[in-house]
Image (tube, helix red, strand yellow):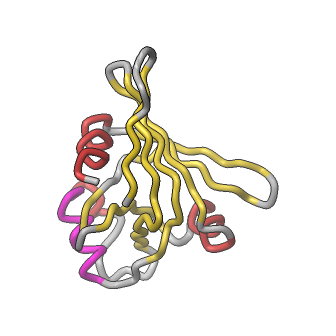
Amino acid sequence: MEEVYAFLKDCGTYYLATVEGDQPRVRPFGTIDIFEGKLYIQTGRSKDVSHQLAENPKAELCAFSKGTWLRVAGTLRDDPRPEAKAHMLESYPGLKDRYSADDPNTQVLYFENAVATFSSFGGDPKIIRF
């Protein structure tokens, strides 16, 4: 999982896909964190992505860097604990003007049953499960 984290951190931006009814939705994200051995992302509960994940927590993210792309598919689980939120916000202090650990709008979610696939042209895929 640390390899997945390092790749996403290095990319800076990745794209998260969710579904809304039968319509796929994709948007850029930039937050990634490891807390208590789990891979986390962050959003706001007021955003469409939060509502979509509440309806269907299956999601996939994708990132590309230096000829390699990464896809991570799994289920995103909400972690409402202030400790998890605070850890994320310490990693991204620029978010502290919009979010806080005790703000009910701040949402952090972690991947469960994740399958990460690193791929590149000319190489065999590398799969990591966590």
Q: Which SS does the magenta portion mostly show?
A: helix
Point 25% across, 68% down: residue:
37
Compared across the picture, whether 29 is left or right of 65 comes to right
Question: Is residue 97 depicted above or below 14 in this figure?
Answer: below
**Who is closer to the viewer here, 93 or 69?**
69
Compared across the picture, whether 106 is left or right of 51 comes to left
Compared across the picture, whether 22 is left or right of 53 comes to right
Q: Residue furthest top?
A: 122
Is 45 included in the stretch rendered in magenta?
A: no
Question: Is residue 8 depicted above or below 92 in this figure?
Answer: above
**Who is closer to the viewer here, 32 or 128?**
128
Point 40% across, 83% down: residue:
80
**Who is closer to the viewer here, 29 or 46?**
29
Point 29% across, 54% down: residue:
1
Point 48% across, 73% down: residue:
77
Instruction: Residue 29: give x, y in percent of width and height.
Output: 44, 47
Instruction: Residue 16: give x, y in percent of width and height.
Output: 52, 48
Residues rendered magenta in the picture: 82-93
Question: Is residue 97 depicted above or below 16 in this figure?
Answer: below
The number of discs equals 0
Instruction: Residue 25: give x, y in percent of width and height.
Output: 67, 48
Is 90 included in the stretch rendered in magenta?
A: yes
Q: Quadrant of residue 21?
A: bottom right
Instruction: Residue 118: give x, y in percent of width and height.
Output: 40, 35
> Quadrant where the C terminus lies?
bottom left
Question: Is residue 67 depicted above or below 12 in this figure?
Answer: above
Q: Residue furthest right?
A: 22
